[in-house]
Image (tube, rainbow, N blue to C red):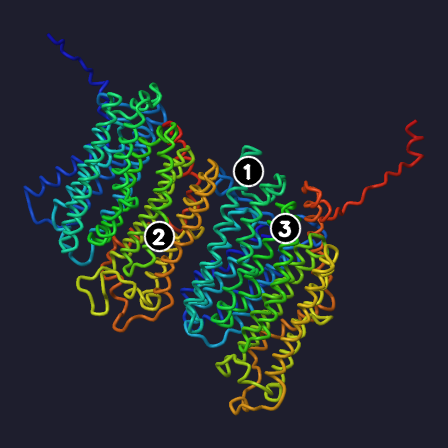
Amino acid sequence: MLDHILSLLIFFPALAAVFGFMIQKESMRVYGVAVSVIEFALSLWLWYAFDGNVSGMQFMEHLPLVPSFGINYTLGVDGISVFIIILSAFFTLLGIGSLTDTKKVKYMIITLLFLQMTMAGVFAALDAIVFYVFWELSLVPMLYIIGAWGGPLRIYASIKFFLYTFAGSLVMLVGMLFMAYFYYQATGVWSFALLDWYRLILPESFQLWLFAAFFIGFAIKVPMFPFHTWLPYAHGQAPTIGSVILAAILLKMGTYAFVRFSLPLFPDAAAFFMIPIAILAIIMIIYTAMVAYAQKDMKQVVAYSSISHMGIIILGTFALNVEGISGSIFLMLGHGVVAGALFLLVGVIYDRRHTKMMSEFGGLAHVMPRYATIFGIMMMASVGLPLTINFVGEFLSLLGFYQQSHILTLLAGTGIIVGAIYMLAAYKKAFFGEVTNEKNKNLPDINKKELFGLIPLVIVAIWLGIYPKPVLDPINNSVKSIVQLMHNKSTTELAKKRIPNLVKPKVVVIDKTIIEEVH
Amino acid sequence: MLAPINISMESLNIMTLAPMLIPVVGALLILMIDVIKGNLHKSLYVTLSLLFLAMDFFSLFNASGIFVKDGTILGMFDVMLIDGLALLAQFIIVIASMLFIPLALTNKRFHEFSYPEFFALFLFMISGFQFMVATDNMILVFVGLETSSLALYTLIAMHNRDKSFEAAVKYFTMGALAAGFFSFGAMIFYALTGSIEIHKIAVVLAANGYADMGYVLVAISFMLAAFAFKLSLIPFHTWAPDVYEGSSATMAGYMSIVPKIAAFVVAMRFFEFLVHSDVVWLKIVLYAFVVITMTVSNMWALVQTDVKRMLAYSSISHAGFVMAAILIGTTQANSALFFYWVLFAFTNLGSFSMLWISRQKDLPEYQMSDHSYDKFAGMITTAPVAALIMGLFMLSLAGIPPFALFWGKIYLISAAITSGYTVLALIMALNSAIAGYYYLKLIVYMFMKEPVMGNHGQMYVANATLALRTIIGIAAVGTIFAFVVINPLLEFITTFVYNSGY
């Protein structure tokens, strides 16, 4: 069974979703929780069986799908993807468990289970077309979640979200088809297998074009400045659960794809575009942090801060060294936990007051002490306080990029300070001071269902902040092999310089006695 | 004194005619039954047509066995040409017809299906299409084209609404013009080369090195216009949306698939040698046709208020997309054309059938046209299964993986890439994104809006009978599980196309 655990992780929720149509409406919530508990248990089992010392792919599965065109159903995980899969199962569980009263709750849970299928699929796929299938398919449930349960502008927001990402990924698809064609030209066989592509060394001019094609697809998903305009709408209109999954997992698809596709496939192009992309990332960090400071809506603050953090992830990824990439992957997990928790927290107050405007609140710490505490912890984690989960990732990302450029790293650092400003300002506006608004006087504090969603996130945020080793080590191992692969594949001087060589030249010491014995 | 011509029956190879003659016999039988005993229920005629189509399918199966063993078969004074293209096209024609004809068994009574002539004409039409694809003799192509088109005009008019008369007359006049263009083009080619067989024209033109380029270009222009009419390429598409709107939803779905594959095969035979020759001008014009057709029809589809008209424009766009295969002209592209069309047949017939089962006899007040978007608002709450299936077809048409059309799309785009049409590949990909918008629009109405007052969901399945549900079920299963069959299908198609030398 362990041989097919990835397929199980992918298709179990889908099967459960199809069966979900038969479940009676009142029992649906229990069914959803049960299914997602099983899914989460499976993902934990995957972690348990996962060997953190191996840098390569594990639990590989292979099934020919269209052999004549080189499309195969190939799955596998390494240290980079395994934790994101666990995180996605975790958030599906928390999301369904803490789901508040919504209309059409049955369809919501079925949609979330389908979404879990696509998320597991994206991170486990090792064939470009299989990856693309899940990548595109993940748009459909999210479209439905935003469009059916969202705010007043929901249809506009959902269509914008869908078309933006769809257009970007079609360009990426053309890039993928080109890549397969180059592979065909080089070897005479069609293949979309990622591990086959890793072995292909392309001339730099091809790399630049293909990198650009993949970049458009990924950058829209992340979303990178200037393609970020769909995200505030999507977050602003989406229901709480939609924002949580979108911020925690779906955005990570883009940054994950950079590590999985762009870097190892096109190392020369990655080194070539390092500085321009870093500049974009820094604009993302600083500009969106400033925009976040100007927001009046609590959810928009979290949404823009989420874009700002994605900027640090991109910066770390394009540091092109082990510290930077490992840090950015760890920050993906950290940001998933923290942003997911913050959206859940905003959802808590929205359920009580049906508004997210910060001017409506003030002094909430008096009325809802437990809520204020959890919000405070998560806000600190978001700011990147040491001993919280985000600190590790941010620090490593910046450390990685510091080796490439001091000035740009300093600029990114100021962005983080702005991050602290807007977060603390928002916290002050909403939680401190006197309770001015009559409506806030009798707000009930956080209830059990909401605690079920939030307490595990708090634990994870602090645990991985203090002791990140169990997660960081496997990530590090896999990243090392990717960086080495990039170094070996790169052809230009620039790339050789920017991507470090991890293999130390070995000093050969021959034991005298052996030579004598031979004689 | 002329010596009598001796022709042995064997050299005629009458068996090559079998697939075309079977529907003709069926049509005559239906007419005879009507003469002997009239006023029979439509289910009899539907079943008879299905049986004859099944026999037709069987004879095609037989012929493809011979083709695999012995290669291309000639027959009837070498007029009939049974090669891979002919067989593949006939398979698509017959299978699509078999999926179409049970849709006549609606719950409500529609005028046209009570006439046995409808079914007789339908079978005559199929045999016309089969003749059209199974020859490279331009006279026989013309005869097949006219037989099928005249039958089709009548079938449309039999729907018996004001708009369907308008549609039939419009289609008839436009079609007559196209036929005129076709015969002019063929005539010039005959004058230039002394032959009406496409492969001989190619040989003669190549032998004299396209000496009379001016005449060749005039002839190609006529031919292009004729094909553009049949394939509804912009700017020769003007008939299409009106004709689709005027005919019944099933007939519109059928028209978007079967007549077009026949025209595609003739176009493939005809343009194959020209695209690979030095006629650069043709490439540019075809390129323009492809790009303009996909893009502009997508734009028009965006602004439609009626789902059927939207689907009409979307079919035009798909035709433009597939026309790229003719422009590219490699084996991969030609295989991709058939591959795409098989998958498109399932999805598009499915989506038009979904419109068909929701067809009302009288329109309620809030509804502007037969299938306006408003009608589908909030369908997920009133008729969830129907909404899911319709949504599935829309996603497939938009090219969302892993549904059927996605595979056709990537194979065709890949064909463009392998032959160096990079920009075309990008345009094709981005057009899928534009098209995504109008397919999403229907999904938005179905899943995200509230139902209009007084809509209880009954009308979405008002016409549904077991037969219709079965057909839609087949289309839906074919759309979802396409990824299981693509490998064998692709290999089958590629072998057939490759072995016919295209």
- In this rendered view, identify the residue nearer to me: A347 or A408: A408
Q: Which residue is mark 3?
A: A273
Q: Does residue B472 show up?
A: yes
User: What is the CA distance from the residue labelled 1 to the residue labelled 2?
Assistant: 31 Å
In this figure, which residue is indicated by the disc labeled 1? A182
Choose the circle earlier in sequence order: 3 or 1.
1
Q: Which numbered disc covers residue B298?
A: 2
**Which residue extends farthest top?**
B1
Instruction: Tell me what residue is drawn at x 25 percent, y 42 percent.
Output: B229
Residue A496: quarter of image: top right
Badge nearest the viewer, 3 or 1: 3
Which chain does the numbered disc 2 sit on? B
Q: Quadrant of the C terminus of chain B?
A: top left
Residue B417 horizontal/vertical position (percent)? 47, 39
**What whole-number distance in Å separates the C-alpha atoms at marks 2 and 3?**
35 Å
What kind of element bears circle 1?
Answer: helix
Q: Quadrant of the N terminus of chain B?
A: top left
Q: Residue type at mark 3? A: Phe
**Structural crowding at the residue carrying mark 1, measured as other residues with C-alpha within 10 Å and reported as few (<14), some (14–19) or many (≥20):** many
Q: Nearer the viewer, mark 1 or mark 2?
A: 2
Q: Which residue, as the protein is rendered here, is positioned at the far front? A: B214
Q: Which chain is disc 3 placed on?
A: A
Are labels 2 and 3 assigned to the same chain? no
Dot 2 falls on a residue whose secondary structure is: helix
Determine the image quadrant of residue A288.
Answer: bottom right
Badge 2 local density, few (<14 within 10 Å), some, or many (20+)? many
SS label for mark 3: loop
